[in-house]
Each structure stands twice: as structure tokens, then as C-alpha cells.
Image (cartoon, rainbow, N blue to C red):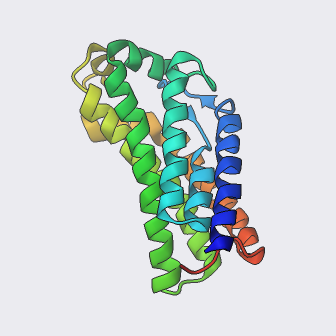
């Protein structure tokens, strides 16, 4: 328990610091979204600490995403527009999908590795893929659900259905995020496993 606590208290601040740095490394896309790699520290937290660690770092990702609506830790044009419409709903839309993502990743990794006894490299890579996939799915679903009736979203959707809009909006950045997150999370996760940071719970 002492070793687990020490590892947790070392990793969480370090991963949150990485999140802050990555907040400035967004690649803007035409649809108002950006390519971001902040889901990678969330995946690492889920693998090394578990669902609680994933939720904490995921929540930090969501908080940073919300702060970017106001130009803090980077800037999000879409976030600024949404915060201008309704700051509370903008917080819900940007915070809770990331927190849920981290929590789900922690459970998923434990299921694959501890229960199903799958190969550790596969588990790490699959967790990285799901980190990006769930982030995109939850973020876009909550965006359309909470803001779909606003003038801003009606203009963005341009008469398209929800599924068509989501696919068109995240086609490039979603694919890039999933590939990068799968490769880097797989490599980093395996290295952390070899170093003893990933253990059975």
C-alpha cells in the first residue's frame, strides 16, 4: 500500500504537469476543433494507478479544456464560443466526458490485463486507442446534446444529422489522435510495466 501510494503521489502531479504542457500543443482544424494529445497522460494514469487515477487525471484534462475557453493553458475558439453561450454547460461539456473517459479506461485496462490476462503490450496499446476514441465520442456527443439547439451549432452542423456532423468534424483529427495515442501509450505503458510502475491490483 505504501509503494502504491508513493507511486500515485509521484505520477499524478507529473501527468497533470504534462497535461498543462500539452495544452499548448493543439493543432487547429477547420471545423473549430483541434488535434490534441492530452488523452495520453489519462491513459497512462489509468494503466499505472487504475480507475481513480484515470478519473483524477481525466478530470484535470477536462478542467484544462474548460480553462482554454478563457485563454488559460492554451486557447480554444470553439470553447470560447460555447462559454459565451452558457459557461456552466461549457464546463459540463468539457469536464465530465474527460473524467468519465479516465474512469472507464482504468476499468478497461484492469479487465483486459488482470481478468482476461491479455498481453501487456496489447493492453497498453488498446487503452491508448480507447482513450482517444472515448474522448472523441463523449466530447462530440455531449457537444451536440448540450449545444445542438444553439445558433452556433446549427451553423456548424449546416443541416447535417448528428452522426454525419460528428464524422465530418472529427474525421482527420480523430484518426490522428487514435493512431498517436495507440502507439505512444503502448510504448510508454510497456516501458512503465518493465520499470515496475504497472502492477496487478
Q: At x 63% / y 24%, what residue is drawn?
A: 74
Query: Is 133 situated left or right of 142 in this image?
Result: right
Q: Is residue 27 above or below residue 98?
A: above
> Residue 131 at x, y = what percent?
51, 55
| 177 or 124: nearer the viewer | 124
| 85 or 168: nearer the viewer | 85
> Residue 110 at x, y = what percent?
49, 75
> Residue 72 at x, y = what percent?
60, 21
| 157 or 4: nearer the viewer | 4
Q: How many marks?
A: 0
Q: Is residue 84 above or below residue 79?
A: above
Decide if residue 3 is in sight here. Answer: yes
Q: Is residue 82 above or below residue 35?
A: above
Decide if residue 156 is in sight here. Answer: no
The quadrant in which residue 187 appears is bottom right
Q: At x 73% / y 69%, what residue is drawn?
A: 192
> Residue 16 at x, y = what percent?
64, 44
Q: Is residue 175 above or below residue 88?
A: below
Q: At x 25% / y 27%, what residue is drawn?
A: 148
Residue farthest to the front, as pictured: 2
- Of the 4 image quadrants, the one containing the N terminus is bottom right
Residue farthest to the left, as pictured: 149
Amino acid at each position: 500500500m505504501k509503494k502504491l501510494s508513493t507511486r500515485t503521489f509521484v505520477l499524478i502531479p507529473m501527468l497533470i504537469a504534462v497535461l498543462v504542457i500539452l495544452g499548448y500543443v493543439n493543432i487547429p482544424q477547420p471545423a473549430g476543433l483541434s488535434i490534441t494529445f492530452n488523452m495520453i497522460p489519462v491513459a497512462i494514469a489509468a494503466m499505472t494507478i487504475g480507475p481513480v487515477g484515470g478519473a483524477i487525471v481525466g478530470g484535470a484534462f477536462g478542467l484544462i479544456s474548460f480553462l482554454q475557453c478563457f485563454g488559460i493553458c492554451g486557447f480554444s475558439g470553439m470553447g470560447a464560443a460555447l462559454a459565451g453561450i452558457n459557461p456552466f454547460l461549457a464546463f459540463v461539456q468539457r469536464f465530465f466526458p474527460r473524467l468519465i473517459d479516465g474512469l472507464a479506461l482504468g476499468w478497461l485496462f484492469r479487465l483486459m490485463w488482470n481478468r482476461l490476462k491479455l498481453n501487456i503490450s496489447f493492453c497498453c496499446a488498446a487503452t491508448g486507442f480507447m482513450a482517444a476514441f472515448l474522448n472523441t465520442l463523449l466530447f462530440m456527443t455531449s457537444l451536440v446534446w448540450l449545444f445542438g439547439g444553439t445558433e452556433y451549432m446549427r451553423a456548424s452542423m449546416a443541416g447535417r444529422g448528428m452522426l454525419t456532423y460528428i464524422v465530418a468534424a472529427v474525421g482527420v483529427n480523430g484518426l490522428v489522435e487514435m493512431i498517436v495515442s495507440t502507439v505512444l501509450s503502448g510504448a510508454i505503458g510497456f516501458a512503465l510495466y518493465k520499470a515496475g510502475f504497472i502492477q496487478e491490483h
